[in-house]
Image (cartoon, rainbow, N blue to C red):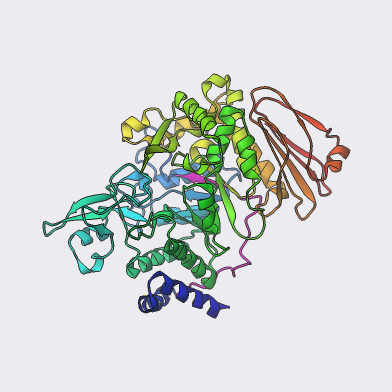
Amino acid sequence: MNESRLDKIRDLLVYIYDREQGARAFDALLRLIPKEMGKGSPDGHREPLSEKDACLIAYGDILSPPNGDEPPQAALARLAAFLEARNCGSFSYLHILPFHPYSSDDGFSIIDYRKIDPRLGGWDDIASLAREYKPVFDLVLNHGSVKSAWFISFLKNEESHRDWYITKPADFDVSPVFRPRTLPLLTPFLRSDGSTVFVWTTFSSDQVDYNFANPEVLLEFIKIFFEYTRHGARIVRLDAVAYLWKEDGTSCIHHPKTHAIIKLLRALIDYLELDVLILTETNVPHEENLSYFGEGDEAHLVYNFALPPLVLHAAVSGDAGPLRDWARTLPAPGEGPVFFNFLASHDGVGVLPAKGLIDDRSFQKTLDTVLERGSLLSYKDTKDGLVPYEINCSYLSAVAPPSLGNTEERARAFLCCHAVLFALAGLPAVYFHSWIGSEQWVEGPGLCGYKRAINREKPRIDLVEEALGDERSLRAAVYVGFKKMLAFRRAEGPFAPGVPQKILPAGGSVFALARGPDRSGRHVLCLQHFGSRPENYRLAGAPALETLARQGIGSEILLSPRETRWIGYGGGRDISVLRI
C-alpha cells in the first residue's frame, strides 16, 4: 500500500512540473519527511467526525484585556481562560486564525510562518490549547507579506529567493485573469539595484503571490505543513487556494495544477498516516466549490460557501424556498468528504456562491434590506464592471436587527439561522462573534480603513463577561441558545456527518429536514421557521412517522414566529425536544 502511495506522490510531482524536475522534487521531498512521521492513525482508522464535533473560529487576540490589566496577559492565554469558563463542551475544534507575525489583513499577510506573533504568546500557548481542542491552522499558500525575509531577499535579487514570486512586464494583459478584488493585479516594487519589478498581487499590494512553478516554493510549504502537524494541527485550512497556480492566457483560478497540489498534500497525509484533515477555502459559486472534493482524493472538508447567503436570504425575506431547493441537491452524507458548514466568519458573506441559486431580483431586495440595516458591500472587478462580491456585516445585525423587537425575538431569529447550520450534515463552525452575540462594529471600517473590520472588533473581556452574566442582554440570550442547541446536538447520534439527511416538504418560511436513522435507529426531525407569523407545519415525508405518532406528536405542529424545534425519536429511547 505504501509503495502505491509513494508512486502517487511521484506521479503528481511529475504532472505538476515535468519528468526531470518532478523526479528531483520527489527525491527532495523524501529527504524532508521527518523521521518521527508516519506513526499516526492509519488512514481509515482516524477518529471520525461525530455529532459531538463543532468548530469555533476566533482570532487569537479577539478579546482585549480589561482596564488595569498590568502587565497584560498574553492574548492566547486570555482566550484559553475565557474558553475554559465558557465553552462547556460546545466546541471540540478551535480554528485560531493566523497567529504569525503579519503586516496587514488581520494576520493573512504573513511575515514569518515559523513564529508566533509575540503579542499573542508563543508555541507553548498553542500547545496548551491543543491539549483541550483539536486545532485548525491556516496555511496561507497563495501569498505572503512584502515585509517577509523571503521577499526582501527577492528584492535584493539573491539567488535563494530570485524565482519565488511571479513577475510580469508592466503591460501584461490581465484581462483573462479572474479578479476577486478591484485593486491592480500587478504592483511595482523597487529592487536594490534600482530597477522596477512588477509582482503579481491577487489581493493587495502588501500580499505578494508565490511562484509555485518553482518546486522550491512548494517544498518549503510542505515543510511548513509538516511543522504544523507536529505542533498539533488536526485540520489545515488552505487559504485562498483556488488562485494558487498561474498560467498566462487563463483565468488563473481552479487550475488543474492547483488541484494537483491539493491532491499531493492529501497523498502525503495518506502515505504518512497523519491524523490531520485538509480544508479548502474557495469562495466561489457552488458547483466550482464542490470540485475541491476531487474524486475523494483532494480536500477532506470543503467550506459550504452557498450556505451563508442562502440562510441570510431566508431570514431576511422569509422565503426558505431557495434554501430548500439547494439543500436537496447536496451530495448524500456518507463515507468521504464532509462540508464545513458556517454562516459567519472573519470575512464577509460571499455573494458569488449564491449565483444561480436565488432569483436575482429577490436577492437584490435582500441586499437592499441588509444595507439599510447597516451592512456594507464589497465589489470585485469584472469585464462587465464592478459586481457585488461580499456582504460585510455582523450576521446577527443583518438577520436580527433592533426593529424585530425585544431581545428574545432577536435572539430567536439569529438562532434559527444557526439551527440550519447545526442540523445539516457536516462539521458546523461558528465565528466567535456570533457565539457571544456581537453586533456590528460600526466604527470599525472607519478606524481600520477596510470594510471587513465591521465584524472584527476586539471587545474588552470584562465587558463581554459582564454582558454574558446579565440574563437580560442579547449576548446572554444568544450564548445560552447556542449552548442548548449544541448540547442537544451532542446527545443525538443522527447529527453525525455521515448519517443520512432528507429535506422534507415545506412551504414558504419553513426549512424542514430529518436526520437518521443512525446505527441505533434514532431519528431527529429539525424544523426552522423564518416567518414572522405562526405557521402550521404538516408532517410529511419524515422517516418513521409512526414512531412520532406513538409518542404523542400529531400530524401538525404549530410553529411560533422564528421558532426552532428539534425532535429526537426512536432507537429505543424516549422522545427529546428542543424548542427555541
Q: Quadrant of residue 161?
A: bottom left
Q: Quadrant of residue 43?
A: bottom right
Residue located 75% across and 36% down the image: 577
> Is residue 441 among what the camera can see?
yes
Quadrant of the frame with the N terminus: bottom right
- As for residue 50 lying within the magenta part, the answer is yes
Q: Is residue 91 above or below residue 396?
A: below
Q: Is residue 69 above or below residue 94?
A: above
120 sits left or right of 542 in the view: left
- As for residue 566 lying within the magenta part, the answer is no
Q: Position of residue 204 (x, y in %)?
A: 30, 46
**Main secondary structure found in the magenta portion:** loop
Residue located 64% across and 23% down the image: 532
Q: Position of residue 232 (x, y in %)?
A: 49, 60
Q: Is residue 294 above or below residue 6?
A: above
Quadrant of the frame with the C terminus: top right
441 sits left or right of 184 in the view: right
Q: Position of residue 425 (x, y in %)?
A: 64, 49
Residue lying furthest right in this view? 550
**457 and 308: which one is in front?**
308
Q: Position of residue 529 (x, y in %)?
A: 67, 31
Q: Is residue 445 above or below residue 256?
A: above
Give the mark count.
0
**399 and 322: which one is in front?**
322
Residue lying furthest left in this view? 194
> Is residue 481 among what the camera can see?
no
Provide the residue span drawn in magenta: 35-58
168 sits left or right of 355 in the view: left
**135 and 520: which one is in front?**
520
